[in-house]
Amino acid sequence: MTAAVVRVPPYHYLHVLDNNKNITRLELGPQTFIRQDHEKIVFGPEPMVTVPPRHFCVITHPAKRDGDGNIIFDDYGQVKIGHGDQEIRTEQDPFPLYPGELLTSDVSPLRVLPPNQALHLRAVRDFELQSMGQGDGDGSAKRTISAGEEWVFEGPGTYHPRVEVEIVSTIHATIVKPNEALKLRARRGCVDKSGVARKAGEVWMVMEEGAYIPSAEEEIVGVQTAFLLTEKTALHVRASRTFTDVFGKQRKAGSEWLVTMQDCEAYVPGVYEEVVGEVYATTLTNRQFCVVVDPVGADGNPRFGQRELRKGEMTFFLFPGETLESGVEDIHVLGEEDGLLVRAREEVGDYKPGDRWMVLGPCDYIPPVEVEVVEKRRAIPLDENEGIYVRDTRTGKVRSITGTAYMLTPYEELWEKQLPAAVEALLANDLDPLADRNTRSVAPAATQAGGRAKHKVVTYRVPHNAAVQIYDYKEKRSRIIFGPELVLLGPDEQFTQLALSGGKPKKGNQIRSLVLLLGPDFMTDVVTVETSDHARLSLTLSYNWHFAVERDSEESAAKIFSVPDFVGDACKAIASRVRGTVAQVAFDTFHKESARIIRTAVFGTDAEGHVRDSFVFAANNLTITNIDIQSVEPVDQKTRDSLQKSVQLAIEITTKSQEAAARQEAERREQEARGKLERQKISDEAKAEKARSDLLLLQAESAAVESTGQAKAEAQARADALEIEGNAAVKQAKLRSDAMAIEVSAELQQTLDRNRAELEHKQKLNELELERAQKLAEIEAQKFKHVVDAIGADTIKSIAQAGPEMQAKLLGGLGVKSLLITDGNSPINLFNTANGLVGPGGTELPHGNGNDS
């Protein structure tokens, strides 16, 4: 309950609602307010709103005032409110809020704008701007502002807000520094600060230094920094549209030009200028030159397709479209052994386009634009053992040049001789031809490249007591060179590769070589033989060999290369002779006379039955001079066992004597160990008895602990079981109650749903019945209306008056002055009946109440 007596302090107020009039009024302090029974304090007491100097507040739904500032009330005494409106108040005296007024914002200080700062303002509705202090910033006495109009209030100054104006944004001045420019764009048609009319979308530059605040019709695109130009740098500029630049020159759209230090020291590109990039000066010394492609002429137009030679000393900029053909080049300084191969681009002097010639030194040479340098050549110094392959580009002939310094002529070039990969690998490895053949192999492909200069004449040092076969494919003949000798390979010559057998036993294509060793040398092979009594043996044989060749005879020299794999063929032939001979003798005989049998098989016997000293292969003059039997091993296990029996018997005798001595020593040590074992057994049994007694004591203690622990565990388990059963029963009862509650709730919900559905069904039926009755009543009313309209008002009036008038006439004829007929159901006011019956003249016409009968 609100207190009946309220003390309102000074500068306070409250709102009182009169329930009888439904009007809320304002009560100001200081006073003692006595509330009546029909009144209610709906707000307050609250302190009045106080606005300090240079502050403001916003009131929503302000009370309306007349021209003198007095509050306007309606006919009922209620304060009139401007609903949806706002009012900004800056008055200094405290003021109350009338019923309906709201303080939207707190009391805030007025916004003070410093220099170089402004507010972008927009009018939200039409109003008249009275003076500068109301937020316009133009100082006009009076002008009309339309809704949507925008302007800028610049500082320094104090901005007084208005409800008709909203703040769009705060603008900070952009400082235009030296060598900078401000790029602006017009948001709509306007006149800039320089008095120039601008169209919407137009872009211009502000070059003046200082702070610049754009107007509401302007927006800042960016700050353009000037490009500082020096003697070494220039600016490449492209025009985006046709215009006249700051130098007064008309530029076409797409044209490009350079701005250099001769034009200005600092350049700010205009709004229609696009900076392609900075161009650095090209400096040529007195020993340099360059060729400029598509040079720009004196008229500023490029000369497409032309070339210009520029020599040092000079410094220049490449204009747009100009390029250096090969960059800055040094003057060709030619010595006595140097030369330049040049080719004519176009006709120059006595040379036609495409002609080639040599410029020989010593001299300095700068090629004119009509001549191009193909390559720089130098005389190639060659020793007697060195050479190069040279190919004539006009005839295609290749020749080798050795033993002198040679300069290629204009129509000659170095020719690269291609060798098979295997030959390249053998030349790169440079193996010692005298090393063991079994250790040789061809290098992998990765190492075969070797780094051989293919235009140099292929050289190969043939070792001592060796030979190399070289075949000339052009002359279709071969030559054989015996070492020691240096081989120089001609343009059409190739080495003959040797693919020899290697390994034990011999396998084909295991050794590759360019030289054929003449021997003496040896080769080793493994041969498997079988005796007449079927004993299989593995023989390791080593053969001494050499080639019997006459170096002065070409026919004899050619025979040594007639057999491609002399190692494999010789080993096969010797193995065949050995197997045939050994197959005719028994194992015991071969075991005793193996050396004689094998030498006889290989070398054969003369007429006197003596073994020959050598075996010669007539096809290539290969001579076998000796055979060394390195090992004889049986292949069959039975043969191996029979050979080992004799050795085993000797070993067995020695073993038995050693076993007897060892047995005696073992028995002695066994007796000593048995005595020690008995003593240790007695000691161990005493310790075992003591340990058994300790075990019995521990078992007794363990049994006592076990019985006690078992009883305790059973009691604890029983208690836990009872507790679990109790908890389970409680939980079961709780779950049963929850289940019953769910069932009851479900039944109740089902009953409610059934009743609701039935009620909705009855409501729908009643609505349908009501709608039916309403439509029938409308139909009856329409029917009655149509009937009445058909009969007519005058006819109905005549029908209504016909009965009473006839009855009145009938009663008048009978002399009856008053008659009342009723059905007994309707009550009759008898107190006023007499007044109704007696008229002004003492006569009253009869009236009927109820149904006449």
Image (cartoon, helix red, strand yellow):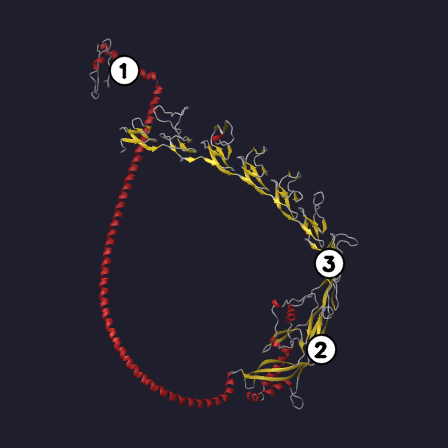
Identified by mark 3, the residue type is Val
Would you say 761 lies left or right of 255 here? Answer: left
Quadrant showing the N terminus: top left
| Front in this rendered view, residue 396 or 309 | 309
The residue under label 2 is 557
Mark 3 vs mark 1: which is more N-terminal?
Answer: 3
The residue under label 3 is 333
Q: Nearer the viewer, mark 3 or mark 1?
A: 3
* Mark-to-mark CA distance, 3 and 2: 55 Å
From this viewpoint, is residue 491 visible? no
* Mark-to-mark CA distance, 1 and 2: 174 Å
Quarter-wise, where is residue 489 in the image? bottom right
The residue under label 1 is 803
Q: Vertical placement of 4 versus 345: above or below?
A: above
Quarter-wise, where is residue 397 in the image? bottom right
x, y percent for residue 256: 65, 43
Identified by mark 1, the residue type is Gly
Mark 3 vs mark 2: which is more N-terminal?
Answer: 3
Which label sits on residue 238? none
x, y percent for residue 22: 31, 27
- SS label for mark 2: helix
Q: Vertical placement of 408 versus 607: above or below?
A: above
- SS label for mark 1: helix
| Front in this rendered view, residue 166 or 779 | 166
x, y percent for residue 572: 62, 79
* Mark-to-mark CA distance, 3 and 1: 153 Å
